[in-house]
Image: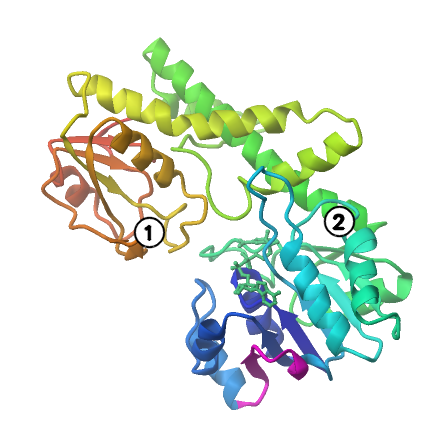
């Protein structure tokens, strides 16, 4: 069976690497640099190893392409393209639309189309199916299903194989074929009664995280005002064996999912006249954390950051990945610069970002730790500046939340 995977980013390439063991995979991506690298066997995604790709390439079971005609003989299509927000923070289905155009214009026999991109309930039924039909001029009737992706890049304990996967087809036949496809490389498949339930479950999972992160971020501020340790308090609460789940405070949320997906749910709620007050407030609290942190740093440093050299340690949105999408470090740096600080950043995993390069981990007046990668030593962080403020809870001996 030939599988075409549209989008070779975090989600699409991860699926390609697992599917390559069982299927002939063509990875379609409109970024030619990514395509060239992939065909040389280099992976740009944490968790997908170059040697795995090389193995499938050598066996003739994987090829990347930016030539859309190469997907025309596929038997199954997976859509894994970005679903960001527009400038006015509304769902942007532009990439989905473009992927539908590629499928509609190139595939002229009935296939199963599975969407893995995160979007609001109704996307498969009301956007993807009609768009593909429009672009294929209704010459072919495909099967459609959704199986939202749960991959957590960089995570080693849970992967495609042992993370249960939700799915639902628009028809029973689509559901059955979806199950068959994933069952080769996923241990537990959970069918739900409609695509809308699967789409909503994915959004609710990330909204749960977003709201709980905001709650603990607000609680960190309360704990500080009470003169108690937020970490000790959370550890104490976490001794309760039921009804509590520990989240830890941070400089805010980042990545493609947590800052974005809840807004997809809020948008569809608004359209239906239902309140989404928690989502809105959680967004605000998480965005305000960067300013709260800068206020704390300023208060500890004679009330002024003017002219001070400040090193932000870790700019990736989470440890051990190079992903800087929506990273909280961006807002922290902005606030520091607004107050006249001379800011550089250290992150060897990211290397280059926004036209700047990672600076040495030394020689600053102030260091603010936003993300701590495992291979950055606590001792080196503490030695990098006479005053260190840690937002991660991983640098004992530093000031912090
Ligand atoms: N990154 C995650 O951890 C994660 C987890 C679960 C779900 N998701 C969801 O999966 C979807 C994809 O996210 P991602 O992180 O893989 O994005 P990504 O940016 O890493 O990758 C997307 C890829 O799609 C390509 N692309 C864009 N438009 C295209 C088109 N029209 N045709 C072909 N290729 C195209 C881009 O060049 C890019 O390589 C999103 O909806 C996201 O919310 C992401």
Dot 2 corresponds to which residue?
198
Q: Give the range drawn in magenta.
A: 59-70
Find residue 51 and report its image quarter: bottom left
Residue found at x 82% / y 52%: 126
Percent position of residue 376, x then y: 24, 49
**Closest to the observer: 161 or 42?**
42
Query: Which quarter of the figure has residue 343?
Result: top left
Residue receiving disc 1:
354
Q: Where is residue 368 in the image (x, y as percent from the top left)?
A: 25, 35
Determine if residue 28 is in view.
Answer: yes
- Going from the N terminus, do you reach mark 2 or mark 1 first? 2
Say the numbered circle drawn on residue 304: none
State left or right for residue 389 relative to residue 325.
Answer: left
Q: Nearer the viewer, residue 290 or 202?
A: 290
Residue 304 coordinates in the image, percent (x, y): 18, 20
Q: How crowded is mark 2: few (under 14 residues within 10 Å), some or many (20 or more)?
A: many
Q: Residues within 10 Å of mark 1 (few under 14, many from 20)?
A: few
The residue lying toward the viewer, choosing from 162 and 98, is 98
Where residue 390 appears, as percent x and y from the top left, is: 28, 32
User: Marks 2 and 1, Cα distance to the nearest angstrom?
Assistant: 36 Å
Question: Mark 2 falls on what kind of element?
Answer: helix
């Amino acid at each position: 069976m030939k599988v075409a995977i549209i989008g070779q980013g975090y989600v699409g390439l991860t699926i390609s690497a697992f599917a390559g063991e069982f299927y002939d995979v063509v990875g379609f991506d409109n970024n030619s640099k990514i395509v060239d690298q992939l065909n040389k066997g280099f992976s740009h995604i944490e968790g997908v190893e170059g040697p795995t790709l090389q193995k499938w390439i050598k066996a003739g079971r994987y090829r990347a392409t930016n030539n859309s005609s190469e997907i025309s003989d596929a038997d199954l299509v997976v859509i894994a393209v970005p679903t960001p927000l527009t400038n006015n923070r509304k769902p942007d289905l532009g990439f989905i639309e473009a992927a539908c155009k590629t499928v509609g214009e190139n595939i002229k026999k009935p296939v199963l189309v599975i969407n893995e991109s995160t979007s609001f309930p109704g996307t498969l039924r009301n956007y993807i199916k009609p768009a593909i039909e429009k672009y294929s001029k209704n010459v072919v009737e495909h099967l459609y299903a959704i199986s939202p992706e749960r991959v957590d890049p960089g995570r080693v304990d849970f992967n495609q194989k042992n993370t249960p996967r939700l799915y639902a087809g628009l028809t029973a036949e689509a559901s059955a074929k979806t199950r068959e496809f994933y069952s080769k490389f996923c241990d537990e498949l959970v069918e739900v009664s409609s695509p809308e339930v699967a789409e909503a479950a994915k959004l609710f999972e990330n909204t749960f995280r977003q709201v709980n992160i905001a709650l603990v971020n607000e609680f960190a501020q309360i704990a500080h005002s009470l003169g108690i340790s937020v970490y000790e308090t959370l550890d104490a609460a976490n001794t309760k064996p039921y009804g509590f789940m520990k989240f830890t405070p941070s400089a805010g949320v980042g990545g493609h999912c947590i800052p974005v997906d809840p807004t997809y749910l809020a948008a569809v709620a608004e359209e239906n006249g239902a309140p989404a007050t928690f989502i809105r407030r959680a967004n605000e609290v998480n965005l305000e954390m960067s300013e709260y942190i800068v206020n704390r740093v300023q208060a500890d440093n004679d009330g002024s950051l003017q002219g001070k050299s400040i090193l932000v340690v870790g700019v990736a949105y989470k440890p051990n990945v190079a992903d800087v999408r929506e990273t909280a470090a961006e807002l922290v740096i902005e606030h520091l610069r607004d107050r006249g600080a001379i800011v550089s950043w250290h992150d060897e995993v990211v290397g280059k970002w926004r036209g700047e390069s990672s600076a040495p981990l030394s020689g600053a007046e102030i260091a603010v730790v936003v993300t701590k990668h495992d291979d950055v030593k606590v001792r080196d962080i503490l030695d990098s500046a006479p005053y260190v403020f840690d937002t991660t809870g991983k640098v004992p001996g530093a000031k912090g939340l």
